[in-house]
Amino acid sequence: MIKKGVYAASLSVINNNLSLNIPETINHAENLIKEGLHGVFFFGSTGQSQLISMNEKKELVSSLSTHKLKKYFFLGTGCNSLKENIDFIQYSMEYGFNTFLIMPPAYYKANENHGVFLFYKELIKECPKIKIIIYNFEKLSGFLFSDELIKNLKKTFPKNIIGCKDSSYNLFEKLKIDDFLIFPGSEAKLLKGLELGCAGCISAVTNVTHSLARKVFDDFENKKDQTLNEKLILVRKIFDKYNLISAVHYFMTYENERFNTLLPPLTFLSQEKGKALITELENLNFLPKKGIAA
């Protein structure tokens, strides 16, 4: 069961032939846990979920099912089709996963709250034991969740709707619901969110800011003075200047060259942009672990 904490929308490692490298993808997630994160989400938007085949997703799930860190692993779906969402959820639940980060379909723009409500209603009807973290990200899905819709979903499905990842940032400052976890989608909003009663964050950039973010979280929980939050925010602001997936992969390539491949239409940062990214981070003394492999 997911709880308060700092989580990563984990990266997917892609082979040169554009297939999913399952062992390396799992290894990266395992390293994030070792670096201090409370958990990771596979197949969020950062994990290129919408671009990865269903067969590869299922193969990764089956591989995760016996992992020693399984309780720290959670899943996104990244499917537009209602039936594919249901298929993937039911398959994953057979392997012991019950908590899913789910965005409304992104291809057809929802015209009203009722349509999105029906989408989640159908998922819950077919998967009655599911726990759902709603993914609010208008930039990607084309739909912006309102307080009203979230409250209606929670009231109607109190055992299934357990939280929200707010990457549009219109909810985390004002939405108050009992027994409901709110995770801003950026570690730059981690401390402010905690002060407002949020549960932590689920972020793309915690793939690299894991230790900073965990320190900020722990210091808040332990009522200690904050010493790293300003740096955490500044690092995030640098990454926000670029496509997040491309920028995080570029940074991670310094640690492992396998991160240098993305699924089209995503592209790796140009050398010019990549060098600018690294230079700005170096100025903050936020350095990759080692040089890019040849």
Image (cartoon, rainbow, N blue to C red):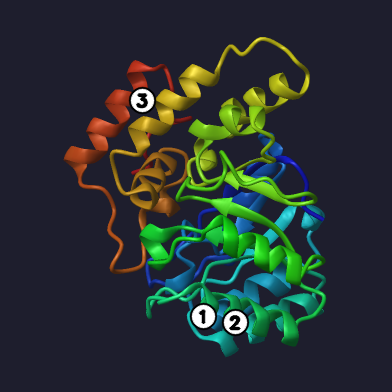
Compared to 255, does 168 lie above or below?
below
> Would you identify the image quadrant in which residue 222 lies?
top right
The residue located at (51%, 72%) in the rendering is 113
Helix, strand, or loop for circle 1? helix
In this rendering, position of residue 264 left or right of residue 48: left
Q: Is residue 236 left or right of residue 38?
A: left
Q: Residue furthest left?
A: 272
| Image quarter (top left, top right, bottom left or bottom right) of the C terminus | top left
Q: Judging from the image, what secondary structure is the residue with disc 3 in? A: helix
Q: Is residue 100 visible?
A: no
In the image, what residue occupies the spot 39% across and 39% down? 251
Considering the numbered disc 2 on the image, is that residue within a helix, a strand or a loop?
A: helix
Q: Amino acid at mark 2?
A: Leu
- The x and y percentages for residue 73 are 72, 57
**Residue 115, label in figure:** 1
Q: Which residue is mark 2?
A: 118
Give the foreground label among 1 and 3.
1
Q: Using the image, tell me which numbered label, if any, was put on residue 22.
A: none
Image position, residue 81 (x, y; %): 51, 85
Q: Amino acid at mark 3?
A: Leu
Mark 3 or 2: the one toward you: 2
Q: CA distance from mark 3 to mark 2?
A: 44 Å
Q: Residue furthest bottom?
A: 83
- Side of 107 relative to 273 (left or right): right
Q: Earlier in the sequence, mark 3 or mark 2?
A: 2
Q: Amino acid at mark 1?
A: Gly
Q: At 58% from the left edge and 64% from the top edge, which residue is drawn?
A: 149
User: Is 260 located above or below residue 197 in the figure?
Assistant: below
